[in-house]
Every structure is written in structure tokens, then in C-alpha cells.
Image (cartoon, helix red, strand yellow):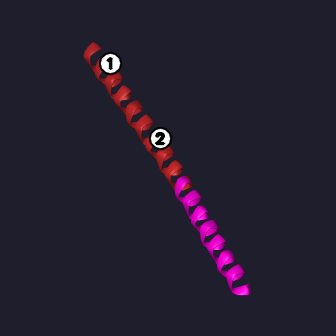
Amino acid sequence: MQVEFEEEENEEMKAYNKNVEIEKLKMTLDENHLKLLEIIIKQDSLENLKKLILKNELKT
């Protein structure tokens, strides 16, 4: 009976650890998604700045 309980407890611990690992991976994914969005926004801003500079140069 004790062995069965220990095996169950061990399986529960494995499942818990797996869930913790999944949550960590989700957080990493979210962080990477935010970094990617930041890069896209910066790139878009740079493109807009470049267009403004080109417009300005054409006017002068």
C-alpha cells in the first residue's frame, strides 16, 4: 500500500514539474513575442523616419 502511494505521489510530482516547465516555456514565448513586437515597431518607425527624410530631401 505504501509503495502504491509513493508511486502515485511520484507521478503527481512529475506531472506538477511538467506543468511548471510548460508555464516557464509559455512565459519565455510571451517574452519573445513582446521582443519581436518591439523590433517590428522599431523597424516600422525607422521606415517612417526614412520616408520623412527622403521627403524632406526632395523638397530642398
What type is the residue that disc 2 sits on?
Answer: Glu
The quadrant the C terminus occupies is top left
- At 32% across and 18% down in the image, what residue appears? 56
- At 55% across and 59% down in the image, what residue appears? 22
Magenta residues span: 1-26
Tag on residue 38?
2
Q: Is residue 54 above or below residue 24?
A: above
Task: Find the distance from the CA under tag 1 to the CA under tag 2.
Answer: 27 Å
The one of 58 and 19 positioned closer to us in this rendering: 19
Residue 49 within the segment the image draws in magenta: no
Tag on residue 20?
none
Q: Is residue 57 above or below residue 15?
A: above
Return the x and y of residue 10 as percentages of the image width and height: 65, 77
Overall secondary structure of the magenta section = helix
What type is the residue that disc 1 sits on?
Answer: Asn
Tag on residue 56?
1
Q: Is residue 34 above or below residue 49?
A: below
Pointer 1 local density, CA inside 10 Å: few below 14, some 14–19, many at least 20: few
Q: Write down the quadrant of residue 15 in the picture.
A: bottom right
Q: Nearer the viewer, mark 1 or mark 2?
A: 2
Q: Write down the quadrant of residue 4 in the picture.
A: bottom right
- For numbered disc 1, what is the local secondary structure? helix
Return the x and y of residue 52 as percentages of the image width and height: 35, 22
- At 28% across and 13% down in the image, what residue appears? 59
Return the x and y of residue 11 as percentages of the image width and height: 62, 74
Q: Is residue 45 left or right of residue 60?
A: right
Q: Residue furthest left?
A: 58
The quadrant the N terminus occupies is bottom right
Pointer 2 local density, CA inside 10 Å: few below 14, some 14–19, many at least 20: few
Q: Is residue 33 above or below residue 15?
A: above
Q: Residue furthest front?
A: 1
